[in-house]
Amino acid sequence: METMAFRMQLNPGKRDEYERRHREIWPELAQALRDAGVSDYWIFLDENTHALFAVLKRPADHGMDRLPETAIMRKWWDYMADIMQTGEGNVPVAHPLVPVFHLP
């Protein structure tokens, strides 16, 4: 099982809306993530910078690279585009984070 982390950017003043939308995550999106091998998925917010830090686990044979091809993922990205930084096709701008320490 691999742990991966990445950073995204929330627009200022959108914390409550971001949390609300994730509390009400669509069951079909949650299932698509699970089907892709995503587990133990956390998103943290740095309230000073509005940076979102996501951490998840996935197996070596995960299917995350196929998620952008799914209609439900594209629909979610369109839904979230008004409250966070996105690029072409409303894909969230995500920067991978490099592990530098782990205490097992």
Image: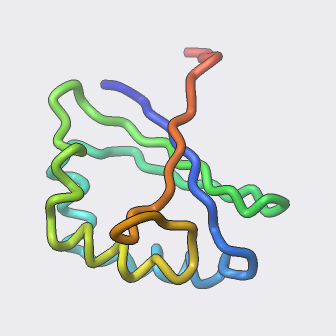
- Nearest to the observer: residue 92 or residue 36: 92
Point 39% across, 82% down: residue: 79
Determine the image quadrant of residue 73: bottom left
Q: How many marks?
A: 0
Vertical order, 49 against 11 (above or below): above
Residue 28: percent from left, percent from top: 19, 72
Query: Does residue 39 appear left or right of residue 11 in this picture?
Result: left
Vertical order, 7 against 30 (above or below): above
Point 42% across, 42% down: residue: 56
Query: Does residue 15 appear left or right of residue 30 in this picture?
Result: right
Query: Does residue 37 appear left or right of residue 55 in this picture?
Result: left
- Nearest to the observer: residue 17 or residue 91: 91
Q: Which quarter of the rendered picture does the C terminus lie within? A: top right
Residue 51: percent from left, percent from top: 68, 56
Determine the image quadrant of residue 98: top right
Check the image and name the residue furthest to the front. Answer: 88
Residue 96: percent from left, percent from top: 51, 37
Point 42% across, 30% down: residue: 3
Render colour scheme: rainbow
Residue 18: percent from left, percent from top: 56, 76
